[in-house]
């Protein structure tokens, strides 16, 4: 297919299939197809599965009805983030956590250690699970002909089982692009067949490059950039994921003041990149964590940690691009209107 | 990979074409392909004196920013202002409408010292 391959967390992954921009716009306007089999999959079962998840994750797992999914995080003891994840509850008895590929080993150790006090069984099925993401306003229309489920019955964040192109799959109406779409969990041996069927039905193959620009336009975090073991999620736009309930690491998270905050920035000119300084009145007041030129806006956009005191003053901000100040303004997330 | 015979090259993937007293500079087909969709081009100021090998422009794709080096020393006499509105021309026509800037060389022998098309093709083979 002519994919440009890159190493990502030990996986050979397509950065693009020719054009990040074309793939990005295909997802915004039509349907794009990602192979995200590198993601980690942990199943959680047992009488205390829910109690365990309530303890280790920040979101309210107890609100998750069978057949639903939610975004969540697991904090460490010092108020940082071990990983962000999606939690799926396909039926009464089981939960599935989908975690970042780069964090599989770290997450597993963390969850295993905390699971000892619970009557719960964790299984790492990362190697036995392939994952495709069909994303875009035309995703449902395209999938309808290849899937034996009534897709209209499944709204955003629904989880269900069906056959796709004749192969058994677990599907979720989720994704990380800001568009409607489906994540399709498959046996590895079925993935190529289903990928080909979706592509032949009109989905545009899309790589990691477009996945990154799509999530950034929505202001979604990417672990290792916006979130890490030392970032307090309450100081980010994702504070909504942290619920006021008892959980591991709670006191550390709620006990800290936010000296810096993660914000969205839009530039008039120039392209901000990770690591570029944010300045105000000639002083460095922050750093860009992710930046790109938004294919939809045609403007440079960034997520950046900026000193809270500067944000309160609505000071003039700029991003240093190769030694030159490019004026920037704080922008609410997402960057694009949905 | 398209490497026109009517110009010279740098191993950092710029092309240079001498016409009259002025050298036009751009990036090669290989370079635009490696960069992917070009979304932003930063050009030098007209009148700036540059040295051969000096980073004088930046071509940015969705993914990355890449320095563009002056193939010869001299004065920047013109830049391709159309790229501000249409940076994608660098991808569409790297050897034509996607040119970046023009230099009036200080020392004509510098141009002769650049890679000829065969030598540049060897560079591409080595980069595989």
Image (tube, coloured by chain):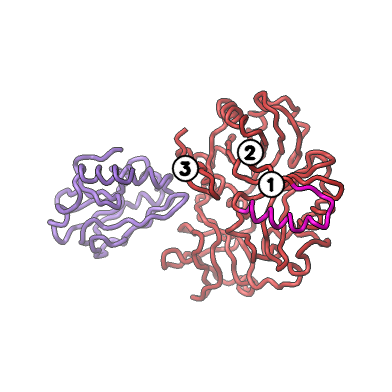
Residue A334 visible to an observer of this rendering? no
* Label 1 element class: strand
- In three-dimensional space, the C-alpha distance between marks 2 and 3, rounded to whole angstroms, equals 18 Å
Badge 3 density bin: few <14, some 14–19, many ≥20, Cα 10 Å: some
Q: Where is residue A33 in the image (x, y as percent from the top left)?
A: 58, 36
Say how many tags the image has. 3
Badge 2 density bin: few <14, some 14–19, many ≥20, Cα 10 Å: many
Q: Which of A132 and B9 is in front in this view?
A: A132
Q: Are marks 2 and 1 in contact (CB under 8 Å)?
A: yes
Of mark 3 and mark 1, the one earlier in the sequence is: 3
Q: Is residue A120 magenta?
A: yes
Q: Write down the colour of chain B.
A: purple
Identify the residue position indicated by label 3 in the image: A5
Q: Where is residue A88 in the image (x, y as percent from the top left)?
A: 75, 44
Chain that bears disc 2? A
Q: Which of A9 and B7 is in front in this view?
A: A9
Residue A324, compared with residue B27, is above or below; it is below
Magenta segment, prevailing SS (helix, strand or loop): helix
Q: Residue at x 33, y 41 (%)?
A: B93
């Amino acid at each position: 297919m002519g994919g440009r391959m890159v190493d990502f967390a030990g996986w050979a992954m397509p950065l693009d299939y020719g054009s990040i921009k074309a793939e990005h716009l295909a997802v915004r306007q039509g349907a794009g197809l990602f192979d995200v089999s590198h993601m980690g999959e942990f199943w959680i079962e047992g009488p205390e599965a829910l109690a365990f998840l309530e303890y280790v994750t920040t979101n309210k797992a107890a609100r998750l009805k069978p057949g639903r999914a939610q975004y969540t995080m697991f904090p460490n003891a010092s108020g940082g983030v071990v990983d962000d994840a999606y939690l799926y509850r396909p039926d009464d008895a089981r939960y599935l956590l989908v975690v970042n590929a780069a964090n599989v080993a770290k997450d597993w150790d963390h969850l295993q250690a905390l699971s000892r006090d619970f009557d719960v069984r964790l299984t790492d099925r990362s190697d036995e699970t392939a994952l495709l993401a069909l994303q875009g306003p035309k995703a449902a229309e395209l999938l309808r002909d290849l899937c034996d489920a009534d897709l209209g019955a499944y709204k955003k964040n629904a989880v269900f089982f069906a056959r796709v192109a004749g192969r058994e799959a677990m599907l979720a109406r989720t994704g990380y692009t800001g568009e409607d779409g489906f994540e399709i969990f498959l046996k590895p041996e079925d993935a190529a067949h289903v990928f080909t069927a979706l592509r032949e039905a009109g989905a545009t193959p899309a790589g990691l490059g477009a996945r990154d620009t799509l999530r950034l336009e929505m202001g979604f975090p990417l672990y290792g950039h916006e979130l890490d073991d030392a970032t307090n999620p309450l100081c980010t736009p994702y504070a909504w994921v942290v619920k006021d309930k008892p959980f591991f690491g709670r006191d550390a998270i709620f006990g800290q003041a936010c000296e810096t905050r993660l914000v969205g920035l839009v530039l008039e000119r120039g392209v901000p990149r990770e690591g570029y300084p944010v300045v105000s009145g000639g002083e460095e007041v922050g750093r860009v964590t992710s930046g790109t030129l938004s294919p939809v806006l045609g403007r440079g956009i960034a997520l950046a940690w900026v000193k809270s005191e500067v944000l309160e003053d609505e000071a003039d901000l700029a991003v240093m691009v190769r030694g030159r100040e490019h004026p920037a303004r704080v922008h609410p997330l997402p960057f694009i209107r949905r | 990979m398209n490497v026109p015979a009517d110009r010279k090259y740098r191993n950092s993937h710029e092309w240079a074409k001498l016409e009259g007293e002025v050298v036009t500079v751009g990036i090669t087909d290989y370079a635009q392909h490696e960069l992917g969709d070009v979304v932003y081009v930063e050009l030098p100021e007209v009148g700036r004196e540059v040295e051969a090998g000096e980073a004088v422009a930046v071509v940015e794709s969705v993914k990355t920013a890449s320095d563009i080096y002056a193939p010869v020393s001299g004065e920047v006499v013109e830049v391709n202002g159309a790229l501000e509105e249409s940076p994608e021309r660098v991808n569409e026509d790297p050897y034509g409408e996607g040119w970046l800037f023009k230099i009036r060389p200080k020392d004509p022998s510098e141009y002769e010292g650049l890679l000829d098309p065969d030598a540049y093709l060897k560079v591409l083979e080595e980069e595989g």
